[in-house]
Image (cartoon, rainbow, N blue to C red):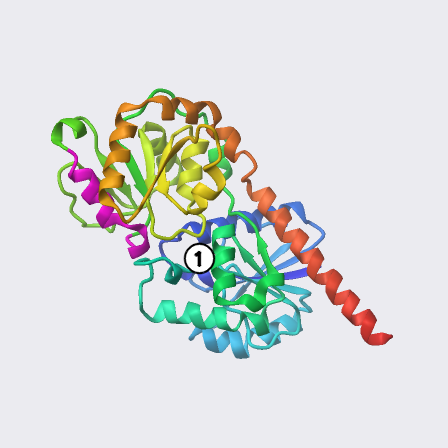
Amino acid sequence: MRIAFDGSCLITKRPTGVELSFLRTLRAYARLRPEDKIFLFHPRSHDIHGLPLNTRPLDLPAGPPALWRRYWMPGQLKHWQIDLLLSPTTALPAKSPCPCIATVHEIPSFHSGAEEIGPASLRHRRARSLLADRAALVIVPSAVTARDLLRERPSLKDRIRILPQPLDPAFLEATPAEGPGRGFLFIGMDRQRKNLARLFGAWTHLDENTRKGEDLTWIGAPRGRRARPGLRFLPPCSIEDLMSEIRQCRALLLPSLSEGFGLPVFEALAMGRPFLASKGSVHEELLGELDPPPGLFVDPRNESSISEALRTLLHDEGFAIHAQQHGRDTVSRMSPDATAMGWHRLAQEITRESNEDRQQGHE
């Protein structure tokens, strides 16, 4: 098979979990499918290192993505005789000589207070409106996103496929933490849906004796952002430093208003640390039925609920013990290889349907 990937999302200087998951899955796919010819469209500014020999990087042209996706990419797909285009984002070319798979990670507009109104939000909404005409299949990371997408685009019902994001293999190979840990940890960018204002408010409203000897650390804070007493802000860091911070913390906090998948919670479990996450989230969907769950679920819009959960995690070491005993097993299947094989199954599904359509056309 000749399969192409739209790596235009790699243009960001600070890659999010989405971009990192895409790259680690792409490398796994190329390794597991050496017989496939793989083509990666990527920005000129992004130098891709460590790609297997069966992967050919192709520079995207300068200019607005909407223009080169409309006029340049279809010609490239035809020139290289591509059988399938897979995009880790929602946008797809208007016309394509091959079937296309898009990815919708989340739809914040269905979660009160989570959507950031602006050009990016409008682009994503428009791209979703075009999926019925452009996408053979649509990947979503969770049933939560699948339900949101169906509410917005019911015509996609038979084309949605759930494929979870993978953890970095380093998390699945590292030695889990021991002991209760100290302080709390938040990992992520400063986005409205991350609910940072309520989280920081819930933490600082705890009395000083409760917070004594503990800090709330934010990894991903903009450089120069000053922290109030009891808070500790760090810029994005390496995987090694990230694992070290998780190993030392008491629990990972992610009371988001909207999450497509929320990898930090699963990274914490891989390291044997409990979590605090939102009710109704993908985390409650996947982890809420564990008995007992290795963490707490809160109403993310209720600051008092968050504060009470923090107080519980400070005084109840049972969550840490349970996470250390069962956290790694809970996430053991979330590997790049598993997600890559999911890509392969979808590719087979698409090519099988394309072959059947061609055969029916000859009859």
> Does 80 appear above or below 37?
below
Residue 68 sits above or below residue 17 on the image: below
Residue located at (67% from left, 66% from top)? 82
User: Going by the image, does 118 lie left or right of 66?
Assistant: left
x and y percentages locating residue 105 in the rendered image: 47, 56
Nearer to me, 166 or 203: 203
Q: Quadrant of the C terminus?
A: bottom right
Q: Does 174 appear in magenta? A: no
Tell me which corner region of the image, top left, top right, bottom left or bottom right, holds residue 178. Answer: top left
Expressed as whole percent of the image width and height from the top left, the position of residue 156 reads 58, 65
- Indicate the position of residue 98 as horizontal and vertical percent values: 66, 70
Q: Measuring from the top left, give residue 326's x and y in whole percent.
A: 48, 26
Horizontal side of 313 relative to 145 (left or right) equals left
At x 30% / y 58%, what residue is drawn?
113
Residue at image x 39%, y 60%?
Answer: 110
Instruction: Name the chief secondary structure element in magenta.
Output: helix
Q: Residues within 10 Å of mark 1 (few under 14, many from 20)?
A: some
Q: Which residue is mark 1?
A: 106
Q: Is residue 4 visible?
A: no
Residue drawn at point x = 63 percent, y = 66 percent: 136
Q: Is residue 70 visible?
A: yes
Magenta stretch: includes residue 191? yes
Q: Secondary structure at mark 1?
A: loop
Residue 268, image quadrant: top left
Instruction: Specify start and end residues of the magenta stretch as a single range.
Output: 190-206
